[in-house]
Image (cartoon, rainbow, N blue to C red):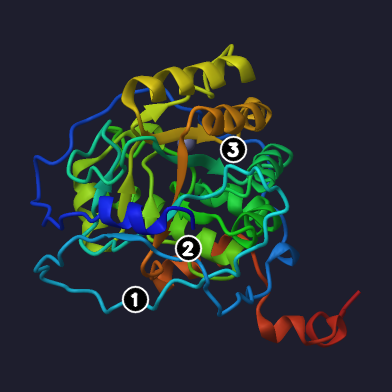
Amino acid sequence: MRNALGLMLASVLAAVVIAAGGWFYYSSRADQGAPKTIAARAADQLPAQAKLAAKDDVSTTATVADKPTTLAQAPAPAPAMPVQQKQACANPNALGVSRVVEIDTTGGPGFGFETFKQFDFLTDKEVVLTFDDSPWPVNTPAVLKALGEECTKGLFFSVGKHAMWHPEILRQVLAQGHTVGTHTWSHLNLNSKKMTEQQAKDEIEKGFSAVKLALGTNPAPFFRFPQLQHNPAMVSYLGTRNVAMWSTDLDSFDFRKGATPEKIVETVMTKLDKLGKGIVLMHDFQKHTGEALPTLLARLKAGGYKIVQIKAKTTFQSLPEYDEAVLKDLKVPTASTTTRPISSVVQTVSQ
Ligand SMILES: [Zn+2]
């Protein structure tokens, strides 16, 4: 990684225990709702277990750590995050990745100044590219292509239902070395008055289990609330699950009606030039975002901005009951019926 040593020195962060309450404020903003029209595909879409390379030659130059809180129910330590092989970059003038930040998600730290104020881990001109509502046909591959051509990496927040519909696209996201977190099961507003705590919890857990099933491996313990609607009880809950929460520093407004690739580029560049750095919120779900990205990445490079890649120290540990609930939704046949010929299962005994 370029300038790794200098950036290392510049980016050592203080670890702070996040006290419950008072460490977030509510954000109300419009967001793109998930479509509800496409039926879930059959179980033959289920991925094989991903075989990830064991080698990691990506240097980690900084760690954002959150001191373990003394939780009543301290979860068991999670296994290390699987790592991907570093891919060679064919573009000598690529934007690339300037440094890789590893997040210790113990206790559920929050990032993104629109909501969370604790961890100011980016230095001047540093940018984190984040993409919500993954995966989606055409649009997600367009984003992946643009990122791939610039040999740079993003942080994706997948909607569980979308992951079930298009697991092959989500696996491409992971295979290309990007980080995959989650964004609920069905993109409901978890801060809605109509939603019970149990329903909100189900949305979170089922989303993680669905993404795990689609990927064939555990996702990163990273979560973004739909519409950035932070339900206080769920913020606490995610803390007990050791999941880091990602708000944003600046919104591309790529989901808004009338958004064009040009507008998206101008919105992001104008806000970045004002703030000097930031976590950028975009949606790979949106067609215009993929179209805007080649220009946006070129503008970032020309403007001297550097991309910071986000990784998690450990993986998310899903709960078996939610893994089962997701499988049930897919109506996966049981092993006993799949291995038996139909004549041994169904017989005409009377006509
Ligand atoms: Zn969303």
Query: How many angstroms separate mark 1 from mark 3 (CA)?
Result: 29 Å
Give how far across and how far down residue 83 sits, in percent.
52, 71
Report the front residue among 221 and 191: 221
Q: Is residue 335 visible?
A: yes
Element under disc 2: loop
Question: Residue 284's mark?
Answer: 3
Q: Name above or below for residue 101 compared with residue 43.
A: above
Element under disc 3: loop
Q: Name above or below for residue 212 compared with residue 160.
A: below
Element under disc 1: loop
Instruction: Report the residue at 66% width, 32% height from top.
Output: 294
| Residue furthest right in the image | 351
Q: Which numbered disc, 2 or 3, marks the residue that appears first in the sequence?
A: 2
Q: Which numbered disc, 1 or 3, marks the residue that appears first in the sequence?
A: 1
Query: Relative to 272, is 283 on the left or the right?
Result: right
Residue on which disc 2 sits: 219
Query: How many angstroms separate mark 2 from mark 3 (CA)?
Result: 18 Å
Q: Name above or below for residue 65 compared with residue 145.
A: below
Q: Are marks 2 and 3 in contact (CB under 8 Å)?
A: no
